[in-house]
Image: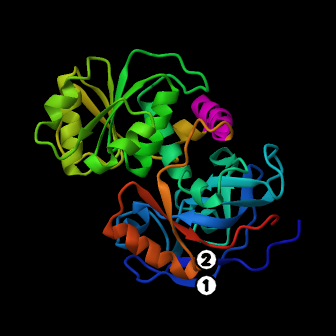
């Protein structure tokens, strides 16, 4: 296929540099197992502003941030057979992990590993699809690789166990609730009272106000030994609280989105979850969930693209505004930037 001539990207020139600068982007050159996506929408994640603010991370500069994209396929690696040119897809970019700028999200053309790309049904707008890639991959890694839960299916059988998902209205929490329910587990979660109905609509059976002084005791009433805990907020306070709850039901593995900041009970084993974990992407779990279950669940409406996007128009020039808006805080929403108008063909 003829090379793509005009790529542009939002560049982070140095640690702490502000704002992102728009300039020519890298020429896509997919490996045999990669897909090049013409990006229509890309979503902001907390990692974007944390890295821009100087979060320690082994990355070179200048670099391109961004992980969640949705658009159309314009190039395929030689061994990719699941997709066709022009197909509507979502993808999780891994540029920061593999130190390949073409594989990052804040640009017109993004390259993604085939396993982290999923076809999306015509009924799902690309702006909504863009909220899913990072949260689905993170939740998959936490629940099915590290916590060892039964894999999800379109017709799950009850397992008889409960998963506590702290922060159910967050992006990761929204995906984790749905995947746990699809695997046959009952879900208990925390949220603001204004988001109770939202997390229940995703499948949560028990919802608790995270600001309630008695939240720990109330959560413990619905958990038992052998149940599971995934902290989808993972600040110092929520990690401590989640560890306390897990320790009091007998302990086990505690899935966290950030490195643990405290010493926990001896029966609690904290695990820092990494969305691009090779234990997920290179395993039977990745194949079963990302290649098989997830696309089918999207097509059948078994997985909702949640939380809803706050769409910011204006292309790459508005990426910095979107990141700033996320940094100020949003609830049960995800910031999505319109990179280019959706087209019928690439």
Quadrant in which the C terminus appears: bottom right
Say left or right for 307 vs 87: left
Question: What secondary structure is marked by label 2?
Answer: strand
Does the magenta portion include 148?
no
Residue numbers of the magenta segment? 282-298
Quadrant in which the N terminus appears: bottom right
Task: Identify whether 167 is placed above or below 186.
Answer: below
**Mark 2 or mark 1: which comes first in sequence?**
2
Q: Distance between the residues labelled 2 and 1?
A: 6 Å
Does the magenta portion include 295?
yes
Examine the residues drawn in magenta and state their main secondary structure: helix
Where's residue 5, x and y in %? 79, 78
Give the colour scheme of this rendering.
rainbow
Q: Which residue is identified by label 2?
A: 9
Please say if the residues under marks 2 and 1 sit with CB atoms less than 8 Å apart.
yes
| Crowd band around label 2 with a 10 angstrom C-alpha radius: few (<14), some (14–19), many (20+) | many
Q: Is residue 141 visible?
A: no
Where's residue 296, x and y in %? 68, 35
**Residue sitting nearer the eye, 250 or 56:** 250
Q: Residue at x 76, y 67 (%)?
A: 343
Where's residue 26, x and y in %? 67, 74
Q: Is residue 264 visible?
A: yes
Q: Which residue is identified by label 1?
A: 23
**Can you tell which quarter of the image residue 6 is in?**
bottom right
Say left or right for 80 vs 263: right
Task: Identify whether 346 is placed above or below 90.
Answer: below
**Residue sitting nearer the eye, 87 or 24:** 87
């Amino acid at each position: 296929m003829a090379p793509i001539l005009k790529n542009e990207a939002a560049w982070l020139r140095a640690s702490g540099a502000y704002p992102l600068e728009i300039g020519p982007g890298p020429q896509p050159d997919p490996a045999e197992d990669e897909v090049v996506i013409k990006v229509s929408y890309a979503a902001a994640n907390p990692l974007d502003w944390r890295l821009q603010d100087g979060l320690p991370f082994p990355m070179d500069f200048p670099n391109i941030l961004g992980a969640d994209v949705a658009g159309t396929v314009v190039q395929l690696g030689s061994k990719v057979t699941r997709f066709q040119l022009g197909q509507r897809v979502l993808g999780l970019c891994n540029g920061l992990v593999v130190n390949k700028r073409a594989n990052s999200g804040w640009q017109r053309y993004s390259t993604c590993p085939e396993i982290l790309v999923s076809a999306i049904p015509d009924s799902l707008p690309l702006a909504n699809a863009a909220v899913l890639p990072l949260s689905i991959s993170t939740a998959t890694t936490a629940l099915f690789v590290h916590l060892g839960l039964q894999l999800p299916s379109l017709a799950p059988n009850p397992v008889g166990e409960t998963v506590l998902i702290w922060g159910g209205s967050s992006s990761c929490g929204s995906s984790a609730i749905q995947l746990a329910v699809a695997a046959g587990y009952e879900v208990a979660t925390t949220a603001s009272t204004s988001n109770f109905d939202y997390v229940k609509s995703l499948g949560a059976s028990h919802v608790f106000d995270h600001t309630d002084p008695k939240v720990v005791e109330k959560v413990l009433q619905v958990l038992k030994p052998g149940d599971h805990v995934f902290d989808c907020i993972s600040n110092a306070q929520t990690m401590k609280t989640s560890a306390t709850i897990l320790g009091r039901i007998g302990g086990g593995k505690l899935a966290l989105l950030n490195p643990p900041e405290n010493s926990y009970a001896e029966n609690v084993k904290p695990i820092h979850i990494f969305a691009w974990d090779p234990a997920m992407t290179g395993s039977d779990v990745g194949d079963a969930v990302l290649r098989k279950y997830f696309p089918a669940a999207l097509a059948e409406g078994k997985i909702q693209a949640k939380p809803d996007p706050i769409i910011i128009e204006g292309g790459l020039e508005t990426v910095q505004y979107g990141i700033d808006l996320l940094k100020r805080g949003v609830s049960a929403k995800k910031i999505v930037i319109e990179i280019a108008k959706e087209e019928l063909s690439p």
